Amino acid sequence: MKDGKFYTTVIERGQSNRNDNNHKFLVSRIRGRWLDVGCNTGWLLEDVPNGTGIDSSEIVLAKAVRKGLPVVRAVAEILPFADKAFDLAVISTVLQAVLNWKVVLVEARRVAQKVIGIAPRPGTEWGVLNGKHFWVQCVVPPEDIVSMGGAVNAVPGDDGTLYYFEI
Ligand SMILES: C[S@@+](CC[C@H](N)C(=O)[O-])C[C@H]1O[C@@H](n2cnc3c(N)ncnc32)[C@H](O)[C@@H]1O
């Protein structure tokens, strides 16, 4: 696993109104034993009990480790957990950064009873391949999530850049 051309930005509360808004929205929806897929510095894990985090980036994960959070370095495509080990998996603004978003969703569903997350709408800032952000690897049309049996909705307080999904 190399950080290389992938996402290595450290995210914490107070850096971005959009991230803070997503965070608040997700906190109210998390229950039970849960997995934060692409947990970054663990800032969601800090606010909701009974969570475990994984992230592929050593740089961001080091911050979570320093906070004493239960995190593991792993890729979302191959989660080191048993089938249905969690009640819920959360994938917050991660699908655009992985190589194959379908594999990631299927893997999250394997380890959790339910999966929720937030993803960029195609054509918006983080929803463009070879655009402003080199680390955008996937653009996920909301209708593709629906075709996998999921449901999509707006993220309250967002300007339409993102959508919320449950699957
Ligand atoms: C935009 S950040 C979102 C972080 C956090 N979920 C949040 O909402 O603030 C994307 C995160 O996904 C991680 N990531 C990217 N590709 C990954 C992969 N294949 N497996 C695991 N984590 C990955 C990145 O290291 C980064 O921390």
Image (tube, helix red, strand yellow):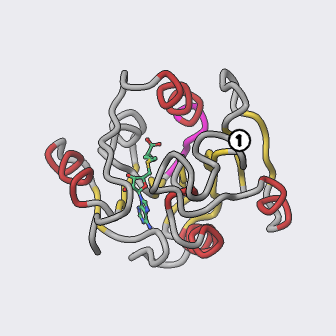
Q: Quadrant of the N terminus?
A: bottom left
Q: Residue 100 in the image: x percent, y percent?
A: 58, 72
Q: Residue furthest left?
A: 66
Q: Quick check: 73 above or below 22?
A: below
Q: Residue 73 in the image: x percent, y percent?
A: 28, 66
The residue that appears at 36% across and 27% down in the rendered structure is 13
Numbered range of the magenta stretch? 27-32
Q: Quadrant of the C terminus?
A: bottom right
The residue that appears at 85% across and 65% down in the rendered structure is 147
The residue where tag 1 is placed is 163
Question: Does residue 38 appear to the left or right of 90 in the view shown?
Answer: left
Q: Which residue type does callout 1 highlight?
A: Tyr
Q: Residue 124 in the image: x percent, y percent?
A: 67, 40
Q: 88 or 57, which lies in front?
A: 57
The residue that appears at 62% across and 45% down in the rendered structure is 118
Q: Quick check: 25 above or below 10?
A: above
- Asked if residue 31 is among those painted magenta in the image, a careful observer would answer yes
Question: Does residue 28 appear to the left or right of 41 in the view shown?
Answer: right
Q: 110 or 160, which lies in front?
A: 160
